[in-house]
């Protein structure tokens, strides 16, 4: 029973490029959450998605960031025209039910913008 | 605004002794609290949680205490073991956001010395 899978584990992008981060939830889970961790800080909520729906995107920056969770395939967090300040660890979590207070986290994608 | 605070960035404890990690929150709407443990280059792993209807929850060597009037919770690890060395994050959520969004503290790095 594989856990939450994120890829790539490490991603290096030049300023202005696009970054795509993928998250495959645990089997049977249809709720996905994205968090960002800046250096020396805690995780900050970005977005909550169910299959084909964005439920809460209150933590997403207004520009350049988008997320989707299609009917088939992984959830994607997309960052366009990356800047140095986007360098962070991005974690995805999944849960079986909405409001499940024991979400399981993936190992994260560390994005470095050079 | 930081709604969940962990004011001690690090803690060093001798093996076999008690480790006490503290967490404060400001939002009185929070009614469910969790502790996560995180090793370097891995995602957070759920450790223990507590609902606001309780003031204590115990699981093996781990006990979480909640003081609602003080908006304070603590995690006790007894006895501490070298394998407990990790970063510990406190998180909070509540009915106000349908338990869908966790607010994390900035973490406390625990070092258990053999």
Image (tube, coloured by chain):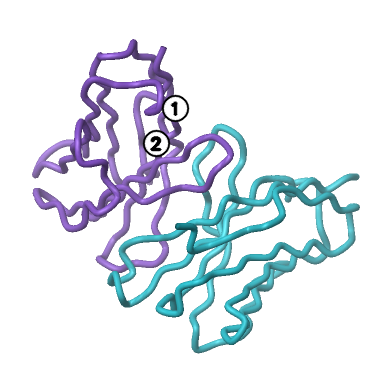
Chain colours: A purple, B cyan
Packing grade of label 1 (10 A; few <14, some 14-19, many >=20) is many
Same-subunit check for callouts 1 and 2:
yes
Badge 1 is on which residue?
A110
Q: Position of residue B54 (x, y in %)?
A: 55, 87
The quarter of the displayed image where residue A19 is located: top left
Residue A53 shown left or right of residue B3 in the figure? left
Residue plotted at (49% across, 80% down):
B51
Q: Chain of mark 2?
A: A
Packing grade of label 2 (10 A; few <14, some 14-19, many >=20) is many
Element marked by disc 1: strand
Reply above or below: B102 against B24: above
Q: Position of residue A23 (x, y in %)?
A: 29, 37
Which residue is at the far front? B1
Residue plotted at (79% across, 51% down):
B11
Q: Chain of mark 1?
A: A
The quarter of the displayed image where residue B1 is located: bottom left
Q: How many marks?
A: 2
Reply above or below: B44 against B102: above
Q: Position of residue A2 (x, y in %)?
A: 38, 42
Element marked by disc 2: strand
Q: Considering depth in this image, is A76 or B3 the residue closer to the camera?
A: B3
Q: Considering depth in this image, is A66 or A104 the residue closer to the camera?
A: A66
Reply above or below: A63 against A95: above
Q: Position of residue A53 (x, y in %)?
A: 11, 52
Badge 2 is on which residue?
A90
Residue B45 shown left or right of residue A81 in the figure? right
The quarter of the displayed image where residue B18 is located: bottom right
Residue B8 shown left or right of residue A27 in the figure? right
Residue plotted at (46% across, 47% down):
A43
Indicate which disc, 1 or 2, sits on the residue closer to the N terminus. Answer: 2
The reply to whether discs 1 and 2 touch (Cβ–Cβ < 8 Å) is: yes
């Amino acid at each position: 029973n594989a856990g939450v899978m994120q890829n790539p584990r490490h991603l290096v992008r030049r300023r202005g490029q696009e970054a795509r981060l993928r998250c495959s939830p645990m089997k049977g889970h249809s709720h996905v959450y994205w968090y960002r961790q800046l250096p020396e800080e805690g995780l900050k909520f970005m977005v909550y998605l169910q299959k084909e729906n964005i439920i809460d995107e209150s933590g997403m920056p207004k520009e350049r960031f988008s997320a989707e969770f299609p009917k088939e395939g992984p959830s994607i967090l997309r960052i366009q025209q990356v800047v140095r300040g986007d360098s962070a660890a991005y974690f995805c979590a999944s849960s079986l039910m909405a409001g499940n207070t024991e979400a399981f986290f993936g190992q994260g994608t560390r994005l470095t913008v050079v | 605004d930081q709604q969940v605070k962990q004011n001690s960035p690090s803690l060093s404890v001798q093996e076999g002794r008690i480790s006490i990690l503290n967490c404060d929150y400001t939002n009185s709407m929070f009614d469910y609290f969790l502790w996560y443990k995180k090793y370097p280059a891995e995602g957070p792993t759920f450790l223990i949680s507590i609902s606001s209807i309780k003031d204590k929850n115990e699981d093996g060597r781990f006990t979480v205490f909640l003081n609602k009037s003080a908006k304070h919770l603590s995690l006790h690890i007894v006895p501490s073991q070298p394998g407990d060395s990790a970063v510990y994050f406190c998180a909070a959520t509540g009915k106000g956001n349908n338990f869908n969004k966790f607010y994390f503290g900035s973490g406390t790095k625990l070092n258990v010395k053999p």
